[in-house]
């Protein structure tokens, strides 16, 4: 029996029709217990060819934390992608599939001692830092490796800001580069992160202004840099249109090559943009209830087993199975399966009436979902399946 979904133009504006089509075909032929995450390989491949295309001298390093599923990593490795990591766990999985250390960098400014030890033995050679303690640690475990300093830059307009935890201002960045050099490390460049799901193109302008200032003052101090790592932050469509990667990159490219040396090396570290909009979570409606004047629908994926970012303000789009009541749309509060009242995914979502037992698809959910999932309350971590 073919499943029926109420798909409209809105959905096709969020996820490509080819991805939706593949998903529906998969659901018609496979019987797997929900919840699980489907990743459209063709979409991932398309994103990897798009990212970095409009920035000269750019190398792309996938931020593994967005989705560390081994099949995704194998697929990206096959496409000769680079990888950005933060932990020994991420490094071990990359080593296990044969990624050479020259294609691995770590831009986590505070690394554990255990990670540094293992990174040294695997001959990873590019690390970010933003404190003297970090220089001391890196110099001890991996003397004369390449390091780049993390600048703090505005994260306004990013739906998942990262700036408060990491990064230093210009003066500190300059003294840290000197300190790294004096400690025997090889200070090669600058990094920043404009914030994840960054829909404000000006964040890159401000960040590049700051980086250029640091580049010049470092040079005056006798530190010749060669690398600019522009972090991640490229946005994807969740419920509305966002600035395109092409527009961001053309802007970034012109800003860089107006001001930095022609032979500068550029690194980009996208996570969300590589896998986010290639992913569709498949869940089942497990209950419905009217509470006061709110209509609640409960699905088997929630805040603790996949949709954690909803708590930080990411809003997803949904497709409901079953077309009979398709015309009667109502506002729904969507909640996950656990007994915790924190497990509420969204409110005031306009949906056709969902039926218990039917499927509900969560669009653009390939990044920062399964990688955050826990087994809280006995719900298992959803599988990721490449299609
Ligand atoms: C998480 C992270 C990224 C990826 O960010 P996205 O917004 O997913 O593109 C890149 N670099 C660093 C250092 C990160 O921590």
Image (cartoon, helix red, strand yellow):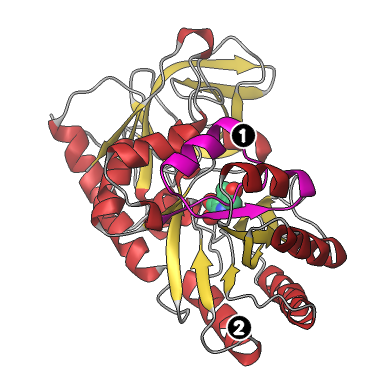
* First of labels 2, 1 by sequence position: 1
Q: Is residue 126 magenta?
A: yes
In the displayed structure, 168 sits above or below 341; it is below
Distance of mark 2 from mark 1, alpha carbons? 33 Å
Q: Is residue 155 magenta?
A: no
Q: What number is the disc on residue 103?
A: none
Left or right of 174 on screen, residue 18: left
Other residues around mark 1 within 10 Å, as few (<14) / some (14–19) / many (≥20): some
Question: x%, y% of residue 254?
Answer: 58, 87
On the image, numbered disc 1 is attached to which residue? 112
Q: Residue 205 appears in which quarter of the rendering?
A: bottom right
Report if the beta carbon of the residue with label 2 is closer than 8 angstroms to ligand 1.
Answer: no
Q: Residue 168 appears in which quarter of the rendering?
A: bottom right
Q: Quadrant of the C terminus?
A: top left
Left or right of 47 on screen, residue 203: right
Q: Give the residue at x 48% y 15%.
A: 375
Question: x%, y% of residue 68?
Answer: 40, 38
Left or right of 205 on screen, residue 233: left
Q: Give the residue at x 52% y 43%.
A: 316
Which dot, 2 or 1, sits closer to the camera?
Answer: 1
In the displayed structure, 45 sits above or below 56; it is above
Question: x%, y% of residue 81?
Answer: 34, 59
In the displayed structure, 308 sits above or below 64; it is above
Query: Depth check: 260 or 138 in front?
Result: 138
On the image, numbered disc 2 is attached to which residue? 256
Q: Give the residue at x 73% y 81%.
A: 219
Q: Quadrant of the N terminus?
A: top left
Question: x%, y% of residue 333?
Answer: 59, 28
**Residue 347 in view in this figure:** no
Other residues around mark 2 within 10 Å, as few (<14) / some (14–19) / many (≥20): many
The residue range painted magenta reads 104-133
Q: Secondary structure at mark 1?
A: loop
């Amino acid at each position: 029996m073919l499943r029926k979904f109420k798909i409209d133009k809105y959905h096709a504006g969020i996820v490509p029709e080819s991805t939706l089509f593949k998903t529906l075909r998969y659901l018609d032929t496979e019987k797997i217990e929900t919840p699980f995450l489907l990743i459209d390989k063709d979409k991932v491949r398309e994103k990897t060819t798009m990212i970095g295309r409009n920035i000269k001298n750019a190398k792309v390093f996938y931020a593994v934390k967005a989705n560390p599923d081994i099949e995704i990593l194998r697929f990206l490795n096959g496409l000769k992608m680079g990888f950005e990591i933060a932990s020994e766990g991420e490094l071990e999985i990359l080593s296990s599939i044969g990624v050479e250390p020259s294609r691995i960098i770590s831009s986590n400014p505070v690394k554990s001692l255990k990670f540094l030890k293992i990174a040294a033995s695997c001959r990873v050679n590019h690390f970010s830092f933003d404190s003297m303690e970090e220089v001391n640690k890196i110099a001890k475990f991996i003397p004369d490796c390449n390091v780049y300093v993390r600048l703090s830059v505005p994260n306004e307009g990013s739906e998942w800001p990262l700036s408060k935890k990491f990064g230093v201002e210009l003066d500190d960045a300059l003294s840290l580069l000197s300190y790294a050099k004096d400690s025997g490390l090889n200070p090669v460049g600058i990094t920043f992160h404009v914030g994840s799901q960054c829909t404000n193109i000006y964040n890159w302008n401000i960040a590049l202004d700051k980086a250029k200032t640091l580049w010049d003052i470092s040079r005056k101090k006798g530190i010749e840099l060669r690398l600019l790592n522009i972090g991640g932050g490229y946005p994807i469509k969740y419920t509305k249109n966002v600035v395109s990667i092409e527009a961001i990159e053309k802007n970034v490219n012109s800003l860089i090559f107006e001001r930095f040396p022609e032979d500068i090396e550029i690194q980009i570290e996208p996570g969300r943009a590589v896998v986010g909009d290639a992913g569709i979570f498949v869940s089942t409606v497990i209950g419905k209830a009217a509470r006061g004047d709110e209509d609640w629908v409960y699905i088997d994926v929630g805040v603790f087993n996949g949709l954690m970012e909803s708590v930080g303000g990411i809003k997803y789009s949904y497709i409901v199975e079953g077309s009979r009541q398709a015309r009667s749309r109502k506002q729904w509060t969507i909640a996950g399966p656990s007994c915790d009242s924190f497990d509420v995914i969204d409110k005031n979502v306009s949906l056709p009436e969902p039926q218990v037992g039917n499927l509900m698809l969560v669009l653009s959910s390939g990044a920062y979902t399964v990688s955050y999932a826990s087994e809280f309350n006995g719900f298992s971590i959803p599988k990721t399946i490449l299609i």
